[in-house]
Amino acid sequence: MKFKKKSEESQNQEVYEQDLTQQENPGGVFIMKLLFREPVGIPEKEHMAAIMEKHMGEMECFWYNEKGAGLAAKKYLSQFKDAALPPQVMITPCTEFNENEIDGFHRGQMWDCREDCDRILSECGYQVIVTDMMAAGLTPKERAQLDMDLMEAAAALYPSCEAIYFCNSGKLFTAQTIREHQIPAHDRFIKFAVNVRFFNIQGTEDMLVDTLGMGTLWLPDLQYHFHGMDPNWVVNHAYCIASYLLSEDNPIEPGDTVDGVAQGRIDGGMRWKCQYEDALIQPVREVIDINMNEYASGRRA
């Protein structure tokens, strides 16, 4: 399969090949890259702890030196087979950032700062990497809260941060957007950490919308292979269903249906069937494929 990223000018669309060698790591480490114009030092230990506790509750700093810092989020317990342990937060020292680490495929899906993403990536030559660790044993809602509280804490801890790149989903936001947002707590992960991507399938009128980032929470991503409908309607539908999966801990079984879309609105009288299938576009992962009835393209298993 060959597909093109969405573009304002179709003649400038780039063509990409399906790459099924790229594998997703469900439940893997949540990674953010904080981007800077100038190098920054590691914040003082007491200041770091104060900012972290303000946003994340009780924290225990178990490691702090010139090579970074590690803190345990005492508010949570991550359940593993033989133990229950607090998840951890890891912060690296500042290193150089190379904008070529983020290729055209990923830049083409940076919808939240589409006009500025190339400028941001070219002007920011430094990065601080912030991750969670040992968080895979949290429930989806707990981990979503942990990671979004961590996002807000990181943006506050580094006032000169220009933007944050979410490695798991390929999203890029300015730090100002994150600092000033008014999004309800339960919607933050879907807004900031889940990317709804859009592609045209080369040589056809088919389109594909999918999500990327739900796997961090052990939840399935979504996929729509379709034609004949405004893709913006499908994107909005994907965000709504992703929010539903998180809030309800994914109750969808194979063969279940969800409300469809008519004239741009969710319509309970139109039912779209759900099936678990392999993703059509990388990374390789299991997704909920949503069959859009007369708008559906391709064959379902």
Image (tube, rainbow, N blue to C red):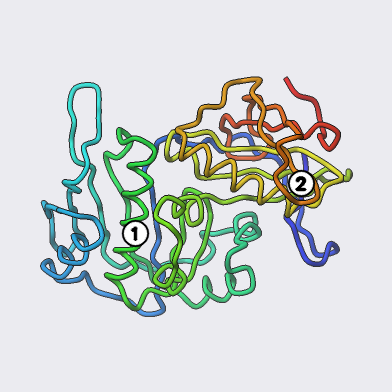
What's the residue at 30%, 70% (across, down)?
156
Which residue type carries mark 2?
A: Phe
Query: Is 46 drawn above or below residue 273 in the view shown?
Result: below
Q: Disc 2 or 1, which lies upstream in sequence?
A: 2
Distance from the alpha carbon under mark 2 to that under mark 1: 31 Å
Instruction: Give the numbered dot on residue 167.
Output: none
Q: Tell me if mark 2 has few (under 14), some (14-19) or many (20+) residues whose alpha carbon lies within 10 angstroms of its own.
A: many
| Image location of residue 200, percent across then percent down | 79, 49
Front residue of this view, candidates 120 and 255: 255
Which residue type carries mark 1?
A: Ile
Q: Secondary structure at mark 2?
A: strand
- Please name the residue that numbered disc 1 is placed on: 129
- Residue at the far front in the pictured view: 269
Q: Quadrant of the N terminus?
A: top right
Front residue of this view, candidates 101 and 228: 228
| Image location of residue 25, percent across then percent down | 45, 35
Q: Quadrant of the C terminus?
A: top right
Front residue of this view, candidates 301 and 129: 301
Q: Is residue 169 left or right of residue 91?
A: right
What's the residue at 82%, 34% (across, down)?
297
What's the residue at 27%, 60% (across, down)?
92
Q: Is residue 40 left or right of residue 65?
A: right
- Please name the residue that numbered disc 2 is placed on: 3
Circle 2/circle 1 CB separation < 8 Å: no
| Image location of residue 211, percent across then percent down | 59, 44
| Image location of residue 84, percent across then percent down | 18, 31
Query: Is 54 drawn above or below residue 229 in the view shown?
Result: below
Q: Is residue 193 left or right of residue 227?
A: left
